[in-house]
Amino acid sequence: MEKETCRGAFSKKILEEAKKDKNIIVVCTDSRGSASLGSYPDELPNQFVELGIAEQNAVTVSAGMAAMGKKVYVIGPASFYSMRSAEQVKVDMAYSHNNVKIIGISGGISYGALGATHHSLQDIALMRAIPGMIVEIPSDANQMTALTDELLKNDCPAYIRIGRGEVPVINERGSKIEIGKAISWYGGADAAIIACGQMVYRALEAAAALEKEGIHITVLDMHTIKPLDTEAIVTAAHKCGCILTVEEHSIYGGLGGAAAEVLKTETSVPLSIMGIPDEDVPNGTDSEVLDYYGMNTDGIVYRVKSLIEKKNTLHK
């Protein structure tokens, strides 16, 4: 299967669009290499700002440019922009309604070998609690390209978290997405898996394995964490009777927490949240860490079967 990085897809798309729109500005913090910005700084030096290792300043400077009518994309490590710059995001971006988009690269456990200082496993919980923020986690490079198109039409502040490495391309090139609308795969009624980011591919692999056993699953790619597609969650709950959420994030406050908030008020079905537990995460590559926590095909299959058992027990 073809693989591509989301950061590379973003860089290609933003260069293409910035050549047509002089109001597009890219800001980075000594991260042009890790962001895969390629030739952007050289081709468009007047639409590029390098601030060095100063993420808090980058958000404030970006907000200032946005207040002057610029469309600003600040790109750098998700772990630093979500935690170190939290106050600037809250006040200068969101509270001030400035059109700044943070592209948080190497999100989740992408920097696995560098340890907890570089993990971003609390970012979604924080960002979705800030009023006015859009929060997105695209599942592949093609979706990142489509999302960039949508963000260019939207004046709201946003946080987009993407990984570091190549991920399998599951969406067709040229496919479109809508912010706030989940994408449905398979359409089975035995259980639903709601996933985001690179975990969507793993959820689809698990769904394919379950299909071979005669267990039919709906998979929702919940690329938008905020505004959340509550209708898709409630529909999946009524149709399938149980839901598993899968995310590269703490089990607290992320996609699973958001789904739980919806289900608690709208309907009552068994829900299981699959993510990183409340503990210090061991060092390793992202695949090694995900496998350690059973967040792979076999682990997802096991959790789905357990949920179906629970559902069937409740219905007896």
Image: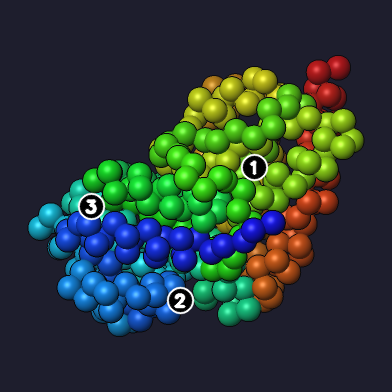
> What residue is rendered at 32% in x and 60% in y?
16
The residue under label 1 is 245
- Tell me the distance, in whole angstroms, between the alpha carbons under discs 1 and 2: 29 Å
> What residue is rendered at 38% in x and 72% in y?
37
Which residue is situated farthest in the left direction here?
68
Residue 55 lies, in percent from the top left, at 32, 73
- Tell me the distance, in whole angstroms, between the alpha carbons under discs 3 and 2: 24 Å
Front: mark 1 or 2 = 2
The residue under label 3 is 99
Tag 3's secondary structure? loop
Q: Earlier in the sequence, mark 1 or mark 2?
A: 2
Image-quadrant location for residue 29:
bottom left
Residue 40 lies, in percent from the top left, at 32, 72
278 to the left or right of 123? right
Which of 204/302 is in front? 204
For the question of whether residue 221 can be seen, the reply is yes
Tag 2's secondary structure? loop
Residue 21 lies, in percent from the top left, at 20, 57
Label 2 neighbour load within 10 Å: few <14, some 14-19, many 20+:
some
Q: Earlier in the sequence, mark 1 or mark 3?
A: 3
The residue under label 2 is 34
Which of 93/261 is in front? 93
214 to the left or right of 180? right
82 to the left or right of 61? right
Q: Given the image, on which type of amino acid does mark 3 rest?
A: Asn
